Amino acid sequence: MDVEKLLSEGIVFKGAKNPVNPDEVRKIKTKAKKSTYVKGTHGSDSAKMKAEIKRRKAARSSQKKRG
């Protein structure tokens, strides 16, 4: 590449390709979002603690729906 062209136009980086299959976009990649982990049913203590914290937070009076 020509240095003068780089200085005048800059470097263009291409982004990631859009997935052809829309189902690939919705795949769950982290275990924190999987239902067994969120509910604490898969057995790890950290998942059980997180599930308990979420349960307590949902039970707070400030978190309940009004109306």
Image (cartoon, rainbow, N blue to C red):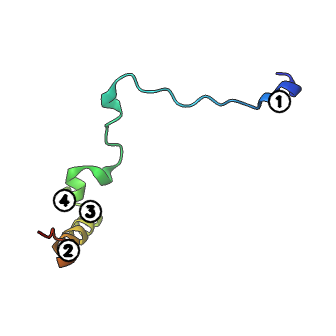
> Is tag 2's residue or tag 1's residue first in the polypeptide sequence?
1
> Is tag 4's residue or tag 2's residue first in the polypeptide sequence?
4
Mark 1 sits on what residue? 8
Mark 3 sits on what residue? 47
> Is tag 4's residue or tag 3's residue first in the polypeptide sequence?
4
Q: CA distance from mark 4 to mark 3?
A: 7 Å
Q: Nearer the viewer, mark 4 or mark 2?
A: 2
Residue 46, image x, y percentages: 29, 65
State the residue lying farthest toward the bottom: 61
Q: Tell me the quarter of the picture where residue 56 sits.
A: bottom left
Q: Tell me the quarter of the picture where residue 57 sits.
A: bottom left
Residue 2, image x, y percentages: 86, 22
- Amino acid at circle 3: Ala
Q: Nearer the viewer, mark 2 or mark 1?
A: 1
- Label 4 with label 1: CB-CB less than 8 Å: no
Q: CA distance from mark 2 to mark 3?
A: 14 Å
- Label 2 with label 3: CB-CB less than 8 Å: no
Mark 2 sits on what residue? 56
Q: Residues within 10 Å of mark 2 (few under 14, many from 20)?
A: few
Q: CA distance from mark 4 to mark 2?
A: 13 Å
Q: CA distance from mark 3 to mark 1?
A: 53 Å
